[in-house]
Amino acid sequence: FTLKGLPMLYHGQEQKESHLPSIFDQDPISWNRDPEAEDWIRHCKTVRTAFFEPGSPVLYEPDDETGSLVVNRNGCRALFQLQEKAERIPAGLPDGEYRNLFTDRPVRIVNGTVDAADLPLLVQDPLADERRGL
């Protein structure tokens, strides 16, 4: 939902499937409704509509050392943990308290890092103009 183009849900993601789906074999989805997952997907759509302009530039910053990914778009900074390699993730933001737009909860940046437990994180980036070279 933070990337360009049409958001895509992977096979079973809307039901929080925990196994890696096969692309070669039949792999049925257990179609039990999951209101929590459904609400999360709706919320991500709302956030996307509110904060990201269609076709706006996206800057990706993968970090193999911490197993994290930063996505910068429309004055926002999103952080994701792709692999559980670190307890604290470099945020690239000034220290302070921010509002996580994904969860509407406060999150603290300390020594330029954020607790991995606070991810995924989406905040309005006070350094956005600087990152764009403005």
Image (cartoon, grey):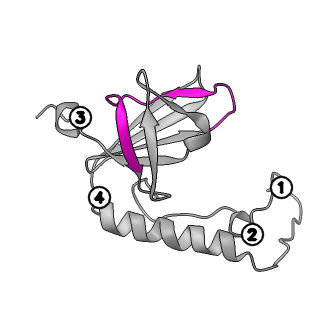
At horizontal 35% and vertical 28% (from top left) the residue drawn is 95
Residue occupied by mark 4: 55
Q: Is residue 129 above or below residue 14?
A: above
Between marks 2 and 3 in the image, the one whose residue lies nearer the viewer: 3
Residue occupied by mark 2: 15
Secondary structure of the residue carrying tag 2 is helix
Residue 74, percent from left and from top: 26, 51
Q: CA distance from mark 2 to mark 4?
A: 29 Å
Q: Is residue 60 above or below residue 44?
A: above
- Labelled pair 2, 4 in contact (Cβ < 8 Å): no
Q: Amino acid at mark 3?
A: Leu
**Chain part drawn in magenta:** 82-99
Q: CA distance from mark 2 to mark 1?
A: 16 Å
Mark closest to the chain's N terminus, 4 or 3: 4
Q: Tell whether 45 sits left or right of 50.
A: right
Q: Amino acid at mark 1?
A: Ser
Q: Tell whether 108 sits left or right of 72.
A: right
Q: Quadrant of residue 109?
A: top left
Secondary structure of the residue carrying tag 1 is loop
90 drawn magenta: yes
Q: Amino acid at mark 4?
A: Gly
Q: Tell whether 109 sits left or right of 27.
A: left
Q: Which quarter of the image is occupied by the C terminus?
A: top left
